[in-house]
Amino acid sequence: MAVLALVLGLLAVVGGVFCLVPGPICGVPAVIVGLLAHRRITSTGGAMAGANLALAGWICGLAGILVAIIYVGLFLAGAIALGDLGYLQS
């Protein structure tokens, strides 16, 4: 599960930077799977490895979601600015 969280987190970051849509689509499952994997690993008391991978997947998932939110915010700010300048008038 930790490796899955890391893969989903990396896809969220890379996809969020290049085309916006995979950020939240892969980011939310990465956060959920990362948290579940981290809890499962820490509950074993060190018998299972991969706590750092799960944590990295969780962080990358959050980063992918944040990148998508920032892009949407910048897009909306640009659209509002263009509307105020009269470029979006028909």
Image: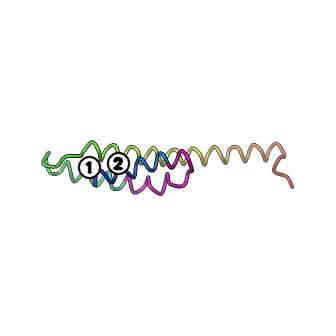
Q: Is residue 55 left or right of residue 90?
A: left
Main secondary structure along the magenta-highlighted residues: helix
Q: Quadrant of the C terminus?
A: bottom right
Q: Could you say which quadrant of the image residue 33 lies in?
A: bottom left
Residue 43 in the image, given as x and y percentages of width and height: 17, 51
Q: Residues within 10 Å of mark 1 (few under 14, many from 20)?
A: many
Per the image, label 2 sits on a secondary structure element best described as: helix
Residue at the disc numbered 2: 6
* Real-space Cα separation, disc 1 to disc 2, in angstroms: 12 Å
Give the residues drawn in magenta, as a range.
15-31
Q: Residue at x 73, y 46 (%)?
A: 80
Q: Residue at x 43, y 55 (%)?
A: 28
In the rendered structure, are the residues bearing label 1 and label 2 in contact, judged by CB atoms less than 8 Å apart? no
- Residue 30 is covered by the magenta coloring: yes
Q: Quadrant of the N terminus?
A: bottom left
Residue 65: mark: none
Residue 73 in the image, given as x and y percentages of width and height: 61, 46
Q: Is residue 76 left or right of residue 17?
A: right
Q: Amino acid at mark 2?
A: Leu
Residue at the disc numbered 1: 38
Per the image, label 1 sits on a secondary structure element best described as: helix
Query: Considering only vertical position in the picture, is 28 above or below 84?
Result: below
Q: Amino acid at mark 1?
A: His
